[in-house]
Image (tube, rainbow, N blue to C red):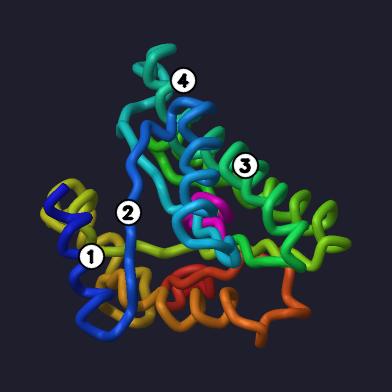
Amino acid sequence: QDALDETARAIERVGGTATFLTGDLAEVDACRNLVAQARAKLGRLDILINCAGMNRRKPIADVTPDDFDTIMAANLRSAFFVSQAAHAIMRTEGGGKIINIGSLTTLMGLGEVSVYGLTKAGLGQLTKTMALEWARDNIQVNCLAPGFIDTPLTHTSIWGDDKRRTWILDRTPAKRPGLPEDLIGAALLLASPASSFITGQTIAIDGGYLAGG
C-alpha cells in the first residue's frame, strides 16, 4: 500500500493523475477484473505494461510443483489473461500498446532460475503471437528484456553477493548495475505513436551484456 501511495503521489507531483487497483494476478478472474476496473475508472485503455514477476531461485532438482505453478501463474499466465482482456477493449477503441517485461532469460539461459526462465522465454514467444494476431486491430505488442537490474528483489540476492556481482560486472560492457530508470526511454518509445511500425520485438536493455565480450 505504501509503495502504491508513493507512486501515485509521484505522478501527481508532475501534473498527472493516478489511480491504483489491486488484485491477485495469480487468479484469472482478478486479471480480468483489474482490466475492467481500469477501463471504468480511466475511461479508455491505451497502454498495458505487464510487469508483474516473482522468482524462487533453486536448482531444477529442488523445484516443487508449488514452485512451478506459483511462478507460472504470476509471471506468464497473468500476462496472457490481462492482455486478453485488454485486447477486447483496445480493439474497440482504435488500437493500443502492450509492453511485456521479460528478462535476459527471455533470450538466454541461466542456472537456478529454470521456471522463471521458462516464463520469461514464454513471454517472448507470446509477444510475437499477440503481435501477429492483433496487428489487424492496430495493437503493437513488444517485450523489454532488462539485464541485471538493481531492484529491491535483486539487491540482496544478486548485488549483495560479491561472487555474483563480480561475475555480472566482468561480463557487462557498461560496468555497472542496471537501474529501473534505464528502461524508461525504451518504454516511452514502445508506448508512443513513434513505434507504430514496431511490433513483435524483444529489446534487451542490458548494458551490452548480450553483445558478448
**Amino acid type, label 4:** Asp
Where does the image place residue 149, in percent across and percent down from the top left?
A: 30, 64
SS under mark 1: helix
Label 3's element? Answer: helix
Label whose residue precedes the other's in the sequence (1 or 4) = 1
Q: Residue at x 26, y 85 (%)?
A: 14
Residue with the most extreme top position: 65
Q: Would residue 133 be visible to someone looking at this image?
A: yes
Would you say the residues marked 2 and 1 are in contact, meaning their CB atoms lie under 8 Å apart? yes
Question: Is residue 106 magenta-colored?
Answer: yes
Instruction: List the residue tagged with mark 1.
Output: 7
Residue labelled with disc 2: 20
Residue 61, quarter of picture: top left
Position of residue 211 relative to residue 69, above or below, is below
Mark 3 and mark 4: span between their CA atoms? 14 Å
- Of the two numbered discs 1 and 3 in the rendering, the one whose residue sits closer to the viewer: 1
Q: Which residue is mark 4?
A: 69
Q: Which class describes the residues within 10 Å of circle 2: few (<14), some (14-19), or many (20+)?
A: few
- The answer to which of marks 2 and 3 sits earlier in the sequence is 2
Q: Label 3: which residue? A: 122
